[in-house]
């Protein structure tokens, strides 16, 4: 199948993985270099993405655009592409609440574009079975997006029903998966404060294998990603309020991840430093 021209806004680590799968599927993939970091430019060059001179050029050339950005920027990105006159299929694949998806959909009303709700679970797609793209919305548009990624490591999973279902599933999964890191960090900080951290880790390794609490290395990996996870927790809180579910866990996790925002994209940060960052007695807070 010929997939035509696809735009990806903006190819960070996850966006680059999504773009790579679109390229592998045979699409010509465009991106917008303006205002992007040197690291993002290197990723785009390595993938063979084509630079658009402006958001207007990208909107004109592409019949499908995927937004893969931090959730706090999702509405702004949608407004930019809508203002540029985009009339194709717009996929918001960000960790946003169903309520935020309604706001994003409203941006395109009357403009000729069709919005698809997307939710990505798993790491940046590199191998089969690791990453899923859930899709909901208008059937024909969902099928168009699913066809692009069929047979790639970014496995499409269409969900019957309206926009908002894919986002709800994504956030529900993240509520368990990512809040578990905040819970593990809290338990470690509590144990550390009472001088029993080593004992806790030994107990967890035996009683809770495979969890963030049992693997300090896994907990450390959350530090570099906390700057993205904090606004995602805010979206989970908003989604929880929308259906009358207490948002306490998500709000507490957001506060935890906010303590670690100065470790953005730092792969060297240690578990010990993250635990120390939760203490009210340190300057990390």
Image (cartoon, rainbow, N blue to C red):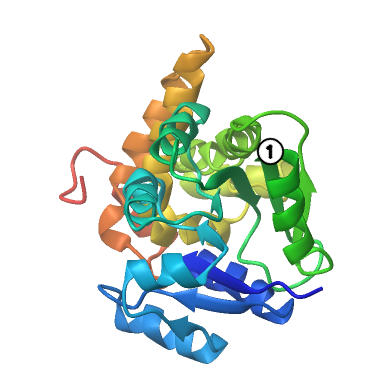
Above or below for 175 versus 271? above
Q: Quadrant of residue 137?
A: top right
| Observer-nearest of 35 and 37 | 35
What percent of the width, then of the height, locates residue 264?
Answer: 33, 62
What percent of the width, then of the height, locates residue 67?
Answer: 48, 56
Q: Which residue is mark 1?
A: 138
Above or below for 98 versus 166? above
* Residue 192 visible to the viewer: no
| CA neighbours of label 1 inside 10 A, class few (<14), some (14 to 19), many (20+) | some
Please report the residue visible at 66 percent of the width from the left and 55 percent of the height from the top: 122
| Observer-nearest of 46 and 52 | 52
Q: How many marks?
A: 1
Above or below for 72 versus 154? above
Q: Residue furthest top?
A: 244
| Observer-nearest of 43 and 280 | 43
Does dot 1 land on a helix, a strand or a loop?
loop
Q: Quadrant of residue 138?
A: top right
* 107 sits left or right of 171 in the view: left
Classify the position of the N terminus by image quarter. bottom right
Please report the residue visible at 49 percent of the width from the left and 35 percent of the height from the top: 101
Q: Residue furthest left?
A: 283
What percent of the width, then of the height, locates residue 98?
Answer: 52, 29
Above or below for 136 versus 55? above
Please report the residue visible at 33 percent of the width from the left and 47 percent of the height from the top: 79
Classify the position of the C terminus by image quarter. top left
What percent of the width, then of the height, locates residue 202?
Answer: 62, 49
* Residue 244 visible to the viewer: yes
| Observer-nearest of 201 and 46 | 46
* 223 sits left or right of 201 in the view: left
């Amino acid at each position: 199948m010929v997939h035509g021209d696809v735009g990806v806004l903006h190819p960070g680590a996850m966006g680059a993985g999504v773009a790579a799968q679109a390229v592998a599927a045979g699409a010509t993939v465009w991106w917008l270099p303006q205002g992007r970091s040197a690291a993002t430019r290197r990723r785009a060059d390595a993938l063979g993405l084509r630079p658009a001179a402006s958001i207007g050029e990208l909107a004109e050339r592409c019949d499908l655009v995927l937004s893969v950005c931090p959730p706090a920027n999702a509405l702004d990105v949608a407004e930019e592409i809508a203002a540029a006159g985009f009339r194709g299929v717009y996929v918001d694949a960000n960790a946003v609440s169903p309520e935020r998806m309604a706001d994003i959909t409203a941006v395109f009303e009357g403009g000729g574009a069709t919005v698809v709700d997307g939710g990505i679970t798993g790491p940046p797609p590199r191998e089969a079975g690791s990453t899923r793209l859930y899709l909901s919305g208008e059937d024909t548009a969902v099928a168009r997006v699913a066809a692009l990624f069929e047979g790639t490591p970014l496995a499409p999973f269409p969900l019957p029903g309206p926009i908002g279902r894919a986002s709800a599933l994504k956030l529900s999964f993240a509520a368990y998966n990512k809040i578990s890191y905040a819970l593990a960090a809290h338990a470690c900080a509590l144990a550390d404060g009472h001088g029993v951290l080593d004992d806790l880790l030994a107990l967890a390794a035996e009683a809770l294998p495979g969890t963030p609490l049992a693997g300090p290395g896994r907990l450390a990996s959350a530090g570099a990603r906390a700057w993205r996870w904090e606004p995602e927790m805010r979206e989970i809180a908003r989604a929880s309020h929308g259906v009358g579910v207490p948002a306490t866990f998500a709000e507490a996790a957001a506060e935890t991840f906010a303590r670690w925002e100065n470790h953005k994209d730092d792969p060297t940060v240690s578990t010990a430093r993250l635990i120390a960052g939760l203490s009210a007695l340190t300057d990390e807070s």
